[in-house]
Structures are given as C-alpha cells and as structure tokens.
C-alpha cells in the first residue's frame, strides 16, 4: 500500500516562506508523478501544482505561479512556497500516481499539513 507522509507546514507571516516535503513510505518518489492540492476552510479542494514522473515537467495553479516551486528527487517531493499570502492558508495535501502524469484525481493522498499565513 502506498502511504504518503507530509511535513513542513506551519504558521508564517505574509511574505514569508515555507517548504513542504512529502515522502512515500518505504519507496522512492522516482517511481511516481506527484502533486499538491489544498483546501481552505469552507472551500473546495483545489489543485496547486504537479510534476511528471520522469521528465519533471511542472504545472501550476495560476495564482501560485512565480511564488511556488514543485520539485522531487529520489526520496521526496517538495513544494517551496515563497511570498506567502493570507489566501494561501489551507490544508495542503501531497498526492501521487504511478502514471507519467498525475491523474486529475490522483490515486494516492497524504493526510495533509496545515499552512497558516497571517498578515
């Protein structure tokens, strides 16, 4: 069974940075495409960013382009978040798939990590 474990969430002032990490328990992330979704209070879950399995091509939600960067290595997937804004406050979920490109509804999900940005 594929288990995703996130870390790196927290409380940060607007304009600050956080780096989220995600690992696949007992496996390497090189075997997966990956992505990050988020859900803010009272809102639906939304796509944030994704990365393909082999070539590392990336895709971003328009609102986070130029502020967020998704990457992965053999061990983990990361989301570097810079110039954070209060509207980035949400629970962030790590996702993964065995496909080359992350499915629109990924097969594997982490438990989520809270990111809170205050002004």
Image (tube, rainbow, N blue to C red):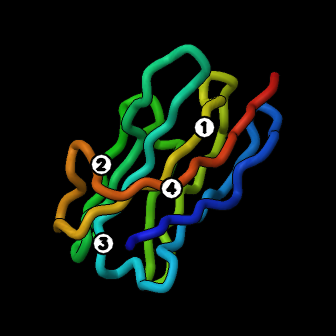
Secondary structure at badge 3 equals loop
- Around disc 1, counting alpha carbons within 10 Å, would you say few (fewer than 14), some (14 to 19), or many (20 or more)? some
Q: Nearer the viewer, mark 2 or mark 4?
A: 4
- Report the Cα–Cα distance between label 3 and label 2: 15 Å
What residue is drawn where x is 56% and y is 51%? 111
Q: Which residue is mark 2?
A: 59
What residue is drawn where x is 61% and y is 20%? 41
Secondary structure at badge 2 equals strand
Q: Which residue is mark 4?
A: 110
Position of residue 48 relative to residue 42, above or below, is: below
What residue is drawn where x is 25% and y is 44%? 105
Quadrant housing the C terminus: top right
- Report the Cα–Cα distance between label 1 and label 3: 22 Å
CB atoms at circles 4 and 1 under 8 Å apart? Answer: no
- Report the Cα–Cα distance between label 4 and label 3: 14 Å
Q: Which residue is mark 3?
A: 32
Q: Earlier in the sequence, mark 1 or mark 3?
A: 3
What residue is drawn where x is 43% and y is 29%? 45
Question: For the view shown, which residue lies furthest in the left direction?
Answer: 100
Q: Earlier in the sequence, mark 4 or mark 1?
A: 1
Image coordinates of residue 8 in percent, x first then y, are 70, 58
């Amino acid at each position: 069974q594929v288990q995703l474990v996130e870390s790196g969430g927290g409380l940060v002032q607007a304009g600050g940075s956080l780096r989220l990490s995600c690992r696949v328990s007992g496996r390497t992330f090189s075997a997966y495409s990956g992505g990050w979704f988020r859900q803010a209070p009272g809102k639906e879950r939304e796509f944030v960013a994704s990365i393909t399995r082999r070539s590392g091509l990336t895709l971003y939600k328009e609102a986070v382009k130029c502020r967020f960067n998704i990457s992965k290595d053999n061990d983990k997937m990361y989301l570097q978040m810079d110039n954070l804004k209060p509207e980035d406050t949400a629970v962030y979920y790590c996702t993964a798939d065995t496909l080359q490109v992350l499915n629109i509804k990924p097969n594997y999900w982490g438990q989520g990590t809270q990111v809170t940005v205050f002004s």
